[in-house]
Amino acid sequence: MDAIGQLAHFIDPVSLAIVGGGSLLAAIARSTRDDVSRAFAALGPMLRADPDADAQAAVRAVNAIEALAQVRGIACADRVETAGRFLKRAAFQLSDAASADAFALWARDELEGRRRRHDAAAGFWRAMADAGPAMGMIGTIVGLIGMFSAMDDAAAIGPAMALAMLTTLYGVILSGAIAGPIAARLERLAEAERAWQTRALDRLERLARAELASPAAIRPPLRPVLQDAA
């Protein structure tokens, strides 16, 4: 009971509201609605992420696509079974590409779009980490004002001092132990993901240029050409 009682001294709803709520509002103010949704949706995948396994799976998938393309052409690339949605989309785009330049353009746009989304998600948590100490300082000032305004009432000094100290503590914890590490991990995972995705798309682009450069690889029209009845 003594340990629980001591722990209870470190829990204060007002301090939590100032630091947690204030930091959350500050991060939301710097983000769009989609960015906020992505930031919280990224927490689950962040815990399960394995960049090395994803990179190895990408190598196997691209090897399979290259092998199939040698036999049946890149039009059959989307028939290769891949585990990740990114590679499935890449295989579909490759099989449906009208030219190697069209696939290369899609690849650049896809990587840039994913970079922006990942940066926005990590940026939300980075904003919370930045706001935490500032909100803690605000709480500390509020607590000090409460202390100075209640100097004639000894019973009121203790809660005000607790508010001043706990908001500082909460701000440091939020920044250094919660939001900051989350942002750093998301940034590191995004960098690792971009690396293997770039390698995979580079190989697929080279495959597209090799296959579509051949006259035999020219795609037939989607609709049959009507011949004159004569």
Image (cartoon, rainbow, N blue to C red):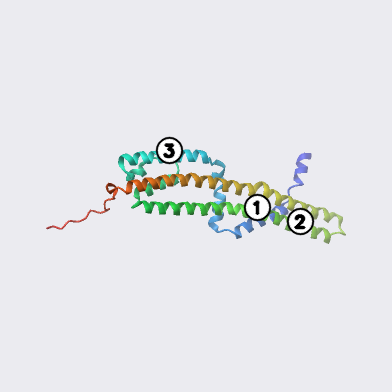
The Cα–Cα distance between marks 3 and 1, rounded to whole angstroms, is 38 Å
Tell me whether the residue at label 2 lies in contact with that at label 3, contact meaning CB atoms closer than 8 angstroms. no
Within 10 Å of disc 3 (Cα), the crowding (few <14, some 14-19, many 20+) is: few
Circle 2: residue type: Thr
Foreground mark, 3 or 1, reads 3
| Alpha carbons under labels 2 and 3: distance apart | 55 Å
The location of residue 66, given as percent across then percent down, is: 37, 41
Identify the residue position indicated by label 3 in the image: 60
Q: Secondary structure at mark 1?
A: helix
Labels 2 and 1: the sequence-earlier one: 1
Task: Assign the C terminus to one quadrant of the image.
Answer: bottom left
- At x 48%, y 54%, the residue is 112
Write the residue at 48% across / 40% down: 55
Q: Would residue 157 appear left or right of 108 to someone viewing this image?
A: right
Q: Which quarter of the picture shows residue 136?
A: bottom right
Residue 140, which numbered label? Answer: 2
